[in-house]
Amino acid sequence: MRHKVKRIKLSRHLDHKRALLRNLVAALFTHKAIVTTEAKARAARSLAERLIHIAKRGDLAARREVLARLPQPDIVRHLFDVIVPKVREREGGYTQILHYGIRKSDGARLVLWKLTDFEKEVTTKPEEKSAKQGA
C-alpha cells in the first residue's frame, strides 16, 4: 500500500524524472522565472528550496553537496554568488508558484514559477499578439 507516500511520478522513470527536475531547477536559477506545468513546478519546488537552503551555508562542503545534486558548475556558481546573497535573511519560501493559464494543446494548467526576491528582473505574462496584426 502507498499510504503517506508523497512522491510525484510525472509519468516518467526515476532517472528521467531526476533529470527533468534538475533541468527545471537549473532553468529557474538561470532565468529567475519559468513557465511550466503545475505538477512539474510542485515536484521541483522541494529540490530548489533544499538547494538554496544548503547554499546559504556558503562553505565548501555546501558547494560540493549542491554540485552533487545539480552537476552544472556555472549554475551552482550563479546560485552561490547571485541568488543566495539576496535571500540570505529569508527563512524559507524562496520560490513562488503563480497560476499562469491553461495550455491550449492539452489543457494542462500552466504556472509561473519564480524566485521570490527577484520580482524586478522577471517579466510577467507576454502581451498577446492580435490575430490581425498585419491588417
Image (tube, rainbow, N blue to C red):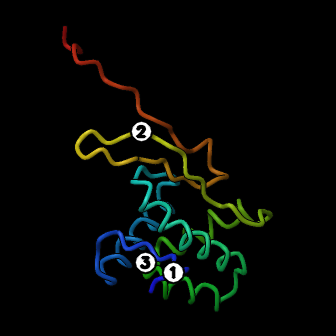
Q: Residue at x 34, y 48 (%)?
A: 108
Indicate the quadrant where residue 39 lies.
bottom left
Query: Left or right of 131: which side holds 6?
Result: right
Q: SS class of the residue under badge 1?
A: loop
Determine crowd level at label 2: few under 14, some 14-19, many 20+ residues with C-alpha closer than 10 A: some
Q: Are marks 2 and 1 in contact (CB under 8 Å)?
A: no
Q: Is residue 132 above or below residue 8?
A: above
Given the image, on which type of amino acid does mark 1 rest? Val
109 and 73: which is toward the camera: 109
| Sequence-earlier tag: 2 or 1 | 1
Q: Residue at x 62, y 44 (%)?
A: 119
- Mark 3 sits on what residue? 72
State the separation of the CA atoms marked 2 and 1.
29 Å
- Mark 2 sits on what residue? 101
Q: Is residue 94 above or below residue 62?
A: above
Q: Residue furthest right?
A: 89
8 and 21: which is toward the camera: 8
37 and 56: which is toward the camera: 37
State the separation of the CA atoms marked 2 and 3.
31 Å
State the separation of the CA atoms marked 1 and 3.
30 Å
| Sequence-earlier tag: 1 or 3 | 1
Q: Position of residue 97 (x, y in %)?
A: 55, 52
Q: Position of residue 77 (x, y in %)?
A: 54, 74
Disc assigned to residue 5: 1
Q: Are marks 1 and 3 in contact (CB under 8 Å)?
A: no
Please tell me whether mark 2 or mark 3 is closer to you in this view: 2
| Sequence-earlier tag: 2 or 3 | 3
Q: Position of residue 29 (x, y in %)?
A: 51, 63
